[in-house]
Image (spheres, grey):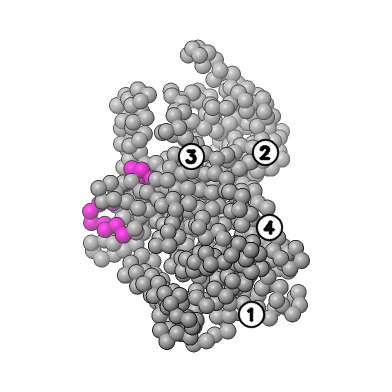
Amino acid sequence: MTDEDSDSKDDDLQNMTFVCVALHDFRAEQTHDLSFQQGELLTVTGIRDSGWWEAKNDKGETGLVPSTFLKIPDHVKSKTDGTLGLETEKRNVPFSDSKSISKKPENSECNEDFITDETEPPRILVDRFSELSINHDVLPEGFRHSMLFDLAQKDSHYIIGNFMAPKLDESGIAFKDICYDKTLLKPNSTLLQKKISLIAARQIPEPPNDFIVKSRHIRMCFHDGNKQVLSNIHTVKAKWNKSSPKLWMFNSKVTPKDSCVEEGEIFIKCNECVPTLGILFELCISYEHVKGTSGEMCSGWAFMKLLNDSGEPVKSKTNILKVQDTEPFTAYFLRANSQGITGFFKKIKDKQKLPRIVISICDPDRPSNQQMSFLPSSLIGPWSCIAILSLSRKIIAEDLLERSSFDSSERILSPVLASLPHVLNDPDLLDALRISWTSVMKNLNTDDIRMDNMKKKTFRDLFCETVFVIANSNNILPLKFEKSELENARKFEIKRLLHIQEAQEKTLPLSEELEFSPFSLKMISANIINFNEREKF
């Protein structure tokens, strides 16, 4: 195609006029934006490469609208495929001048070895992180406080135990995401059930030498692309070498020696139908400063959309996402562009010097997909824990039926229901449950494995004899963030207690090795009134 043909095609797209239906409400954010409501008809009068199109409503009002909020006709989509979302534009350009700045990118990079997803994150999200980037404390330039870490520390709502615990729905007379087929939990269908693999993070900025790095990890959650976190906040620890600290790697499989927080394979399940639904990734570093202070800082973030323009889940693919918010590297890239670098391969080489995170998304296998269908409608967790999470959810649902009447508010006798949220919130306790269950499953015959009732009984017995006992033992000190000495002491003690359970004929609760907390009814029972309260019940 010649340059003249390309320019002619661009002009045709910019001058194209067609009618779209709004898929979602949108409120104007800047002077030249056009507000609209779901179901409203809009006449698009101009297409821009940034994804913000010129449109007019029935009242004759004009402005810019996000194309991802619109249902695009097929005849338009066929012409615009491959031309949108490849160029980043500043939105503070007057609406009257918008056509003059819309132009085709110089090079459309289609080499999947380098860039497989160059779509920009929602602008509202970019603006919010930009506000957080300004700090006046000891953090070095290019780093800021972790938004997701602060959120998880301040509010227990965003921990996995809270999302796994049963919740009353808006009516207050039924449980959310829990439906029964007689006395058994029914699977719930959701919009999105996927498997995500964290492969690597490249060229991630390093803090100065006076910051001692204790851990590198990624925190992630479902996000609406605006301001709202829609799920629990999940954390995955990275591996790195001292010779190449800017390269973060992740475990694809976990062994009994590994922790679930080191697992790079994650399941995601979500039923939020938001056009800008995606996963927010924060690349975080926990540190100790030479002056004695410690904490966590964020070296960048990325956003991966989970729905296409038609509102359907994205197909299986590998994404190479740009890491936002890394000021030193962004400044380098801008200087390189200002020096007149125009070669295609030179630009690719420069892009490789910028921070990137490589993520694969695919459909889960059939057995895992069936197990995920019993989980709550919004959840992120380690792939190796799907089986025990699904099984515990079934047990919890059945224990909820052990009430004298439908409207009874009496306490429910169930150690699993009472203690499971606490176990899920402590990764080392979750690891103990996972390892113990894997060991027990090896000793079950094929017929027992196929019988769901037998597995639930075995799981309940295992939980009460091991993890429940450990969680309520005085031998285990409370877990604190990034206290490596405390974490190692807990791991050693948990491993020792599990060995006692395996080696001795008597059960762990009868062992002289344990010191228990004073017995409380809260250890073995749960109060239905507190199910929606953000506290341990």
Q: Earlier in the sequence, mark 1 or mark 4?
A: 4
Q: Secondary structure at mark 1?
A: strand
Q: Nearer the viewer, residue 94 or 346?
A: 346
| Kind of residue at disc 1 | Leu
Q: Which residues are magenta?
A: 201-214
Residue that carries the numbered disc 4 in the rendered image: 187
Please tell me which of labels 3 and 1 falls first in the chain. Answer: 3
Q: How many marks?
A: 4
- Could you tell me if the residues under marks 1 and 2 are in contact, i.e. CB atoms within 8 Å? no
Residue matched to label 3: 318
Q: Inspect this view and state whether residue 282 appears.
A: no
Mark 2 or mark 3, which is nearer to you?
Answer: 3
**Quadrant of the snapshot with the C terminus:** bottom right
Q: Residue at x 46, y 28 (%)?
A: 110
What residue lies at 36% left-to-right and 34% top-to-bottom? Answer: 351
Residue 444 drawn at (x, y percent)? 57, 66
Q: Secondary structure at mark 3?
A: strand
Q: Quadrant of residue 255?
A: bottom left
Q: Which mark is residue 413?
A: 1
**How much space separates mark 3 and mark 4, taking CA atoms?**
29 Å
For the residue marked with disc 2, what is the amino acid? Ala
As displayed, is residue 355 above or below residue 189? above
Q: Amino acid at mark 3?
A: Thr
Q: CA distance from mark 3 to mark 1?
A: 46 Å
Relative to 45, 233 lies left or right: left
Of labels 1 and 2, earlier in sequence is 2
